[in-house]
Structures are given as C-alpha cells and as structure tokens.
C-alpha cells in the first residue's frame, strides 16, 4: 500500500508541476501577445501621423493654385514669372531629394522630419505674408520661399519613407503605395481647399492652412 501511495503522490506532484508550467507558459504567451499588440498600435499611430504630415505638405503646395495667379498679376507679374514661381517648388524637390537620400546615412531621419515640418510651416506663413511686400520684391521673395518649401517637402517625403521602412514592419510596397496615395490626395484636395479659403482672403487663408 505504501508503494501505491508513493506512486500516487509522485503522480500528483508531476501533475501540479505540469499545470504550473502550463500556467506560466500561457502567461508568457499573453504578455508577448500584449507587447505585439502594443507595438502594432504604435506602428499604426506612427504611420498615421507621418502620412498625415505628408498629406498636409502637398496641400500647402497646391491649395494656392486657384487664386495665386490673380494675386500675382495684381503685383505686376507676367505669366512667365508666375510659372517660374510654381516651377521653383518642384525644381527644389528635384534637387533636394537625391542629395538628402545620400545624407540620411549620417543624419537622423527623425531630425530631418522635424526640421522639414517646421521649415514648411514657416515658409507657408511667410508666403501668405508676402502679399504685403513691395511689388519689386514680390517675385524674388516668392521664388525664395517656394524653393525653401519645396526642399522641405522633399526632405519630409524622404525622411517619412525612411522612418517607416526602418522602424516598422510594413512591407516596402505598402509604404511606397501609401505615401503615393497621400501625395495624390494632397494634390487633389489642395485646390478645392484653396477655393474654399479664397473666401477668407488670400494672406489669411495661406496662414490658416
């Protein structure tokens, strides 16, 4: 009988140890799942914030299309000069993007993203206040501000894609597709938003956006 009792006790101890191990394993899995869920939430939050900044950056470029030509003509600018102002933004993007892509090996993408956002906001406000500049200063001032804004937008685009590709688990095709989608959305919404803000008057609307 003593042998049977010892066997039962040993079996009971083994059962308790197995239950304890199963409980610890389940708790570990739950913690790992919670960490993964938290990481995913952070990734989606980061994705949303960066893509929204990209969307707003393109809106600030295109929302002046409906009314800026009239404002520029009132300052005595020709069609060629107005076209130069618009082209300077894209030319700055064209020149900045490859250079910054090379420099990001030494510069933090987060720093570039923050600096680009600040520069873009300042340039946008300055462009709106440019309407108060003397007529002879209006053209060089607008071109200078648009070059700064274009460089900032290119810096923002490159840094956003770098951050998302380095610090999230999203696939490259997903990141590129979403960035392109938001850029298209910015180009589409910008002019409509500009037409609505035209009712607020030019400089005030530019500062508001």
Image: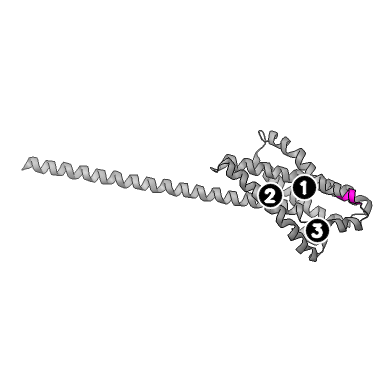
Question: Which disc number belongs to residue 101?
Answer: none
Given residues 123 and 189, the one toward you in this image is 189
Q: Main secondary structure of the magenta part?
A: helix
Instruction: Give the spatial CA distance, label 3 vs label 1.
Output: 19 Å
Q: Position of residue 157 (x, y in %)?
A: 68, 44
Q: Residue at x 26, y 46 (%)?
A: 19
Instruction: Give the spatial CA distance, label 3 vs label 2.
Output: 19 Å
Q: Position of residue 110 (x, y in %)?
A: 64, 43
Crowding at mark 2 (Cα within 10 Å: few <14, some 14-19, many 20+):
many
Drawn side of residue 191 relative to residue 138, left or right:
left
Crowding at mark 3 (Cα within 10 Å: few <14, some 14-19, many 20+):
some
Residue 81 covered by magenta stretch:
yes
Residue with the most extreme left position: 1
Q: Earlier in the sequence, mark 2 or mark 1?
A: 1
> Comparing marks 3 and 1, which lies closer to the viewer?
3
Q: Quadrant of residue 22?
A: top left
Instruction: Give the spatial CA distance, label 2 vs label 1.
Output: 15 Å
Drawn side of residue 47 relative to residue 99, left or right:
left
| Residue at disc 2, secondary structure | helix
Q: Which residue is mark 3?
A: 66
């Amino acid at each position: 009988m003593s042998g049977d009792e010892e066997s039962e006790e040993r079996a009971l101890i083994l059962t308790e140890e197995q239950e304890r191990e199963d409980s610890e394993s389940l708790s570990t899995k739950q913690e790992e799942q919670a960490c993964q869920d938290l990481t995913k939430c952070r990734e989606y939050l980061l994705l949303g914030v960066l893509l929204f900044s990209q969307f707003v950056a393109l809106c600030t470029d295109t929302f002046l299309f409906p009314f800026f030509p009239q404002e520029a003509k009132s300052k005595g600018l020709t069609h060629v000069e107005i076209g130069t102002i618009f082209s300077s933004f894209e030319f700055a993007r064209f020149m900045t993007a490859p250079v910054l892509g090379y420099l990001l090996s030494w510069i933090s993408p987060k720093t570039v993203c923050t600096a680009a956002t600040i520069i873009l906001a300042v340039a946008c406000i300055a462009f709106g206040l440019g309407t108060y500049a003397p007529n002879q200063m209006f053209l060089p001032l607008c071109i200078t501000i648009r070059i700064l804004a274009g460089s900032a937008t290119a810096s923002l685009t490159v840094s956003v894609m770098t951050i998302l590709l380095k610090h999230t688990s999203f696939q490259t095709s997903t990141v590129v597709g979403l960035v392109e989608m938001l850029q298209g959305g910015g180009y589409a919404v910008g002019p409509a938003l500009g037409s609505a803000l035209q009712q607020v008057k030019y400089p005030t609307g530019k500062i508001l956006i």
